Image: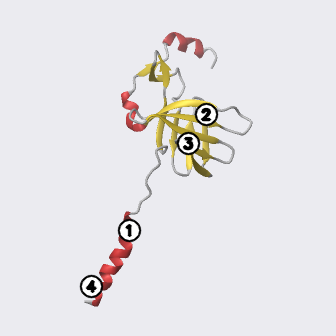
Amino acid sequence: MTRLLFALTLLYLLLPACTNKRQPQPYEGNWTQVTRINNAYVIYIPCALDLRKMKVTDSAIHEVLPMEVNDSRIVSTTPVNGGYRLKGKESVYTFKWLDQQKGTAEWTIQYSPSSPEETVVFVDDDHEKDFEKVHQPESDCANNADTR
């Protein structure tokens, strides 16, 4: 009986620790930039460049820009104006839902205190398939080939 009581007590104490997992924040996940064309957001695919994407975790942001990659370790996260401010050593990312049902969010990004803020709209992975993909016209691509 003592062993059974001990086992039940141990189970009672350990079970909450196993099931008490951290809930992901709304800004966490994979994001793809969307562009407004004719009053609708689309995923605009530029010539010979990567799509702008971000992977956001509770501790870091990995951002793939069209011509470079940017990594930032998150130092602090603060709720602000219905969204969140994620502060890195130099950079600041501010997240706010535009339309949670459609998975679109506005990200305001400042890479350093001396750089300007940039506001970009992204869609999360769960909703990316709902957006039309528009390729940059080939006529524009031919002009870009000369500058590479």
Distance from disc 3 to disc 1, alpha carbons, whole Å, reads 32 Å
Residue ranking furthest to the right: 114
In front here: 20 or 111? 20
Q: Are the residues tagged 3 and 4 within 8 Å (C-beta)?
A: no
Residue type, mark 1 in image? Pro
Distance from disc 3 to disc 2, alpha carbons, whole Å, reads 11 Å
Q: Is residue 42 above or below residue 126?
A: above
Question: Residue 46 bears which disc, if any?
Answer: none
First along the sequence among labels 2 and 4:
4
Colour scheme used in the picture? secondary structure
In front here: 118 or 100? 100
First along the sequence among labels 1 and 4:
4
Q: Is residue 146 above or below residue 26?
A: above
Residue beneath label 1, please?
A: 16
Label 3 vs label 1, nearer the camera:
1
Residue type, mark 4 in image? Leu
Distance from disc 1 to disc 4, alpha carbons, whole Å, reads 19 Å
